[in-house]
Amino acid sequence: MQPIAHPKVTPAKNEPGRVTRPFNFSAGPATMPLAVLQRAAAEMCNWHDANGKPSGMGVMEMSHRGKAFGSIVQHAEASLRRLLLVPEEFHILFMQGGGLAQNAIVPLNLCGPAPGKPAVDFVLTGSWSQKSWQEAAKYSAPHIAASAQESAFHDIPDPATWQLSAGARYVHICSNETIHGVEFQSLPDLRALGSEAPLVVDFSSHVASRPVDWSRVGLAFAGAQKNLGPAGLTLVVVRDDLLGAALDICPSAFNFKNIAANASMFNTPPTYGIYMAGLVFDWLEQQGGIVAIEARNIEKAALLYQAIDASDLYFNPVNPGCRSRMNVPFFLREPALESAFLQGAEQAGLLQLKGHKSVGGLRASIYNAMPLEGVQALVAFMRSFERTRA
């Protein structure tokens, strides 16, 4: 598919220092590039096509089967395929329901059509892979091939130790755990482990932050609200040979084969989310693409982790070999200071740093759209806070 030329996202004048906006460290829905928000605001009531011609409609008003929206979705798909180097044998699907719904939709699509509940392998590395395993029990016989629960999900089990099932329909991993802050630095090679099962990857919280080795993947899915766009859009990238294996009870609107055959138009897709994601893809390409954004993410994460590790007040319990570049949980050695930290951070324009309720502490999510200046501001505040409490 040839990419459709759309007008570039023009960087906002205050982007370098973001002086008029606070830095939002929310885990999702998360901060978005300011240039994207401004472009969307400018087109809210009147979308312009690739030639700058006004449509007279906002994207939310368009028919999803009309020519105008057709160009938007084709552009988004082509841009994403180019950015992530998605091979032609994979279908890019735009769906609804979020990553959480895919915990049911994936087994509904991969566990049929033969009767019974087939085996599915799960590697548990945190809250999200646990949710996937629990949901899949409704449609399959899930088997825990490995678990990091004994380490309080501060590590990732070595793939060499995984106990994979013979004949499993697929092997599921969450490649970045948003809550616990662990990330696979490379995807496992299941064939090297003796398994012919396809690898299913929940890459919701680091999609488009680093390259993907598609030779090791059968299916990957992501909610958009962390790195791709607004909540409501879900991305599924599925290999062609995995279509057509749905359970009979799989709803037709969730059947990957139907969605692929209809270019994500089997039912009305999340049109505005697709439009916004397309703008984000434009922005990513203008940043230099995935290789460039990964280098920036490495720099941001290194700066924050170095500040934590050098501190007497803060600590991160995750094994350094599998620390997330996107979600950095950290804790105070004096937990009673957390409220003062959060209050001071908010006054300094550093928002949404409270840790997830299930683990407590603090968390900074530093997705693609978080500029280096935001992490620098956070580190400066952390050091100032520690000095005043010494």
Image: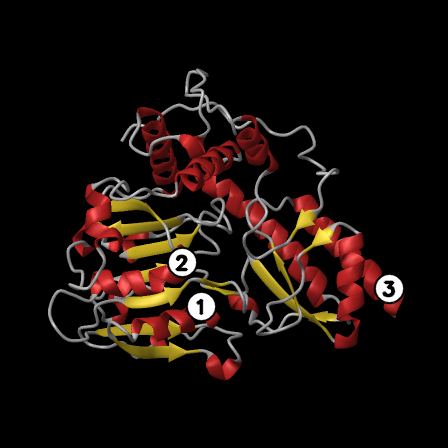
Q: Quick check: 142 above or below 14?
A: below
Q: Nearer the viewer, mark 1 or mark 3?
A: 1
- From mark 2 to mark 1, how far is it between C-alphas? 10 Å
Tag shown at residue 15 = none
Q: Position of residue 140 (x, y in %)?
A: 24, 73
Q: Which of the pair 257/182 is nearer the observer?
A: 257
Q: Amino acid at mark 2?
A: Gly
Q: Position of residue 84 (x, y in %)?
A: 38, 43
**Mark 1, residue position:** 128
Q: Amino acid at mark 3?
A: Arg
Tag shown at residue 99 = 2
| Label 1: which secondary element | helix
Q: Residue at x 17, y 73 (%)?
A: 167
**Relative side of 74 to 39, left or right:** left
| Label 2: which secondary element | helix
Q: Nearer the viewer, mark 3 or mark 2?
A: 2
- From mark 3 to mark 2, how far is it between C-alphas? 41 Å
| Label 3: which secondary element | helix
Q: Earlier in the sequence, mark 1 or mark 3?
A: 1
Tag shown at residue 387 = 3
